[in-house]
Image (cartoon, rainbow, N blue to C red):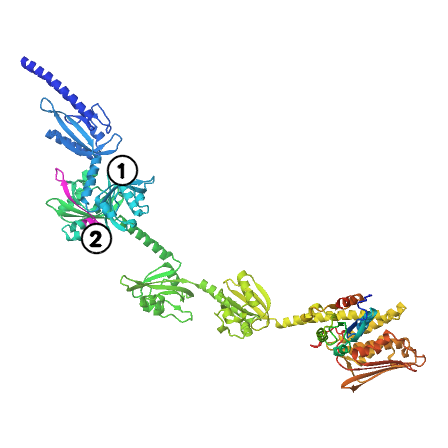
Amino acid sequence: MNAPKLEGRRILLVEDEYFQAREIRGYLEHAGMIVIGPTGYADEVSALLAAEQPDAALVDINLGTGANYETARILKDQGVPFAFFTGYDQAVIPAEMGAVPRLEKPATEKQVIHLLNTLI
Amino acid sequence: MKHAKATQTASVMQTSAEEALRASVRRLRALVAASSDIVFRLTADGSEIQELDGEGLLANHSEATGIWIERHIHRADRAKVRSAFEEAVRSVSMVEFEHSGLRADGSVRTMLSCVVPIHGEDGQVGEFIGSAREITGRREQEEHYRHLADGIDQGLCIVEVMLDADDRATDFRFIETNRQFAAQTGLEDAVGTTMRELAPDHEEVWLETLGRVALTGIPERFDGPAVVLGKGYDVHAFRIGAAERRRVGILFRAIGERKQAELALHQSEEKYRALFDSMDEAFAAVEVLKDGDGAWVDFRFTDANPAFLKHTSMNYPVGKTATELLGSPSVRWARLYGQALDSGKPMRIEEIEPKLGRTFDVNIFSLDRERSRVAVLFTDITERKRSEIALRKSEERLRAIFEQAPMAIALTGPEGEILLRNAMFDQMLGRQSPAINARSYSDVYRGYDMDGRPIPSQDWPAARAVLTAEIVQGEVIEIVNHRGERVPCSFDAGPIRDAEGQVVGAVVMFRDVAGEFAARRELQDSEARHHEILESISDAFYAVDSKWCFTYVNGKAEEMWERSRENILGKAYVDEFPQVVGSDVHKAHLRAARTREVVRLEARSPLSLKWLDIAISPSADGGLAVYFRDISERHAAQERQNLLLAELQHRVRNILSMIRSVVRQSSEGYSDAGEFVAHLDGRLAAIARTQVLLTRSAGAQVLLEDLVRDELSSQLADQDRVRISGPEVSLSPKAAEVLTLALHELATNSVKFGALSDPGGDLSITWGQAPLEGQLWLQLTWEERCQQLEPKPIKAGFGTELIEQRVPYELRGEASLHVTGGGVRAEIAFPLTDIASILETGPARGASR
C-alpha cells in the first residue's frame, strides 16, 4: 500500500453511508492521503470544493435520493479526476459518464488504492 | 411345165429365178441384220409366226408358234392387231398400225408395226413379212409437241420428278422448257437444273402436286405460288409417258394473265368450251355404238373436259372408244347411254367406281339422237358422301352427348315451345307435358330465384333467350323437381338464330348445383366465422394482397390507427401510411414478402409511436397477413423491471459493502473472538430487523414506537421496567435504519452493563417533536437509572460512533452520550426528512428512487 505518489494527496470522498465512508477514509489515510469530506450530501460538495481543491475524488452515485450525477458534472467541469464508487452496473451509467472509471461495491483496500493510482 | 421345151425353158427360168430369189433373200437378210427393227415372218393366214429377230426387244425365236399375239401384244390391243391383220389379209396390201407391245420382260411399249404380204408364184399371198419398231419415245415427243402447240401462249416445261424411297417428291429437274417459260418465270437456262438448285425455298405444294401427278398419272390443276418469283401461277400438271419415267408436263401462266385470258375467252365464241373446261363437273360427249344386232355395245368419246380427265384418271379420250381406252367393252355404260338415247329422258344415277374407290353422281342426257350422241355429266361425290357419313356420325355423337350429358338440355321453337329434351331434363322435372310456349312455362314448371320469389314464365332463361335473345350464363334458380323438392340449378340459355339472324328457338341447359351450393355456403360461413374471429380478437389484424393493397382491416386495427377501414381497403399500404417507409416495421414487411417466411418483431410503431408486437405472415395469394398489438405497457413494465433489477443489484452490493464495513470495523478493540461475534451478530440482527420493517409494505413508514419495542424485545429486556413515551412519529427509512442501530448499541450496553442488567434499574425512552429552522425535528432521550449497580463509563469505539457520529453524518442531526450518576443518558435529535435507506429492497416507492 505504500504509494509515495499518493501520499499527501487530497481526495474528496462522497459517500452517504457512514460505515463505508468511514472505512474508505481509513484506507486513504492509511496510504497517507488527506480526505476531504467525507460527505453524504451533494449540496455540501460545492462548499468543500470551494474551500479546498482535491487531487481526485471518489463519488457514490446514489446518495439516498436515487442516482444523481450532479456532483460528477461539477467535478468534470472543474477538471478533477474522479471515479464512481457504486453498486450500479456500468449499463445504468449514462453515456456522458461512460468514460468515468467505476469501482464496484464492495471493494477491498487494494482495489481502492489501485484505482486512485490510476486517477492521479 | 407340160412341154419339154417349155420345161427346159421353165427350168432355166426356174434356176435363174431361184438364184434371184436366193439373192433377194440374202439381201433381205442383210437388210434385216442391218436394220434396228424387229423383223418377223408370218404364215399367210397370220396364225403362226415363223421366225423372229427380236433386236433385243423381243425374244428371238425360229420355231413356228401360234401364240404370238398372246406373247407379244398387250391384251388391250389384241383385237386391234387382229383386225389390222385381217385387213391386211383381205386387202392384200401393206398395213401399218400402232399398238402396245409386250416386251420379253413384260413391260409395255408403244410399237409401230408394219406387215407386208409376200405373194407366191400363184399370185396368192405366201406369207407376211413384218417389222416392228418401238416408238414410245416418239409418241412422247409427239405428246410434248401437241401440248406445246396447245399451250403456246403459256409457260411450259417438262420435268423429271425425283422421288425418295417412300415415293415422296424431293425435287424435280427441268428437261425441257418453252419460250414462254422464260418469259413467265424469268429463268433463262433452267434446263438440266433442279428446282432446289434454282429456288431452295420453293413452295412445297409444287413438289407434292407434281409428285402425285407423276405417281398417279392424274392431271392436276392448282394455284402454284412462287414467292421467289413474286408471282402466283395457275398450273396444269400432267404426266407424260410411262409412270416409271416420272415425267410431268407443267403448263402454267401467271394468275393475273389467266384472268385476262379468261375474260377474252368469255367474249369469244368458245365461252362454252371454257365453261366446260373450267367447271368441276366432268363433261363428256359420246357417240353410242351398236353391234351388228343393233344392241348398244360401245361408245366413242367426241368431247371431254379437263374435269372429266381428272375424275376418271383417263388419258385424253377424244376419238377413242371405251374398248380402246379400257381394253374391254364397257357394255353397262353403253347400255345406259343407249337407254338415254332411246327414251330421250335424262337419267341420273349414283355410281360407285370400285377401282378408283370413288362415287360419282352421273347425269346422262341425249344430245343428238340422229347421230347417237349423248352427253354425260358427273361429279365426284366421294367427298360429299364421306362428309354425309361424317355428318351422320357427328349427329350421332351429338345425340349421344345430348342424351348422356350430365345436365338437362332442351331445345325450343320460336315460341319457346319445347321441341326436344333429353333424359336428364325429364329426370329433373319429371315427365310432364312440356310447356306450350315461353309465356306459359310457369304453368308447368315451378322455380324460385335466390331471394325466394317465384319465377314468372317470361323470366325463365329459355323464355328470355327466345323472347329477347338474351344469353343467360350460370344463373341459379331453385327448381321444384318432380318430387316437389327445391333443387338449386345453374342455368345457361341462348337463342338459336337462322341464317338471317332471326331467333328461331333457344337452347337451355341446367344442372343440379346443390352440392356446389352447399360447398359455397360452407365457404361463406367459414369466411363469416373467420371474419368474426378476426373482429373479436384483441390483436389488430390487416391483410394486403400481392401489390400490398389492403384486403382486410379488422376493428382493432381501425381503433389503433384511428382510421376507418372503408377509407383504407383497396388502397396501397405505403400510400396510406407514408410514415412507415424505411422503418423497421416496413423492413419487416419487405423481409416477409421476400423470404415468404413469418417475421416477428417488437418495434415502435412509426404511426402511433407505441411499442407493438408484430407478426407478419406471407399469405397464399402472395400477400401478407399481419397481426399486431400494443405492448407499450408490457414494454414499460419490462423497462421498469430492468430498472428495478439494476436498482436491486445496486442495493444488494451496497448492503454487502455496508456489512463488510460493519464487520471490519466491529472488530476494532476486541481481543475476544466470542465477544466480537456476539456483538457483531447483534448488530447484523438489528440491520436485518430494520430491513424487515422497511420491506413490510411498499413505501412503509416505520413508527418510532414499533422500532423501539422491537429492539427491546430482541434484547429480551423486561419491558415493565422500561417507560416508553412520545407522540406517534413515523420515520423515514434512513432514519429508521440509523436509529435502530443506535438504539441497539444503547440497549446492548444497557443489558450488559447498565440499568437493564440491574434488577432494580429502569429505563425511560421518551421523544417529542419540535420545529427548528423550518424543519420538524425529532428529539429522543434515552435515560437509564440504576439502583444497585454502579454505572460504568462507556468505552469510546465503533459502538459510540454509531450514535455520536453516524446520526450527524447520515441524518444531519445531533447525538450525545453521557454517563451520569444514575446511568447512561443519550440524546438524539434529527430533522424528520424523507431519506431512503439501502435496506429498502421491497417494491419501489416512486419516481424519486
Does B290 appear in magenta? yes
Residue B110, image x, y percentages: 21, 34
Q: Secondary structure at mark 1?
A: helix
Going by the image, does A31 lie left or right of B446?
Answer: right
- Quadrant, the N terminus of chain B: top left
Q: Nearer the viewer, residue A87 or B412?
A: A87
Counting from the top left corner in percent of width and height, residue B831 is at 78, 82
Expressed as whole percent of the image width and height from the top left, the position of residue B229 reads: 28, 49
Residue located beneath label 1 in the image: B245
Q: Are marks 1 and 2 in contact (CB under 8 Å)?
A: no
Amino acid carrying mark 1 in the image: Arg
- Subunit of label 2: B
Q: Nearer the viewer, residue B489 or B687?
A: B687
Mark 1 Cα-neighbour bin, 10 Å: few <14, some 14–19, many ≥20: some
The 10 Å Cα crowd at callout 2, few under 14, some 14 to 19, many 20 or more, is: few
Secondary structure beneath dot 2 equals helix
Q: What residue sits 13% from the left and 38% below the top? A: B291
Amino acid identity at mark 2: Lys
| In this view, B390 is above or below B657 | above
Looking at the rendering, the stretch of residues picked out in magenta corresponds to: B275-295
Q: Which quarter of the rendered picture does the C terminus of chain B lie within? A: bottom right
Q: Identify the mark at residue B259; answer none if there is no mark.
A: 2
Residue B716 seen: no
Horizontal side of B775 relative to B453 (left or right) equals right
Q: Please tell me which residue lies in front, B640 or A78.
A: A78
The vertical placement of B759 against B88, above or below, is below
- Mark 1 and mark 2 lie on one chain; the one further toward the N terminus is 1
The image shows residue B334, relative to residue A42, as above or below, that is: above
The residue depicted at 56 percent of the width and 68 percent of the height is: B583
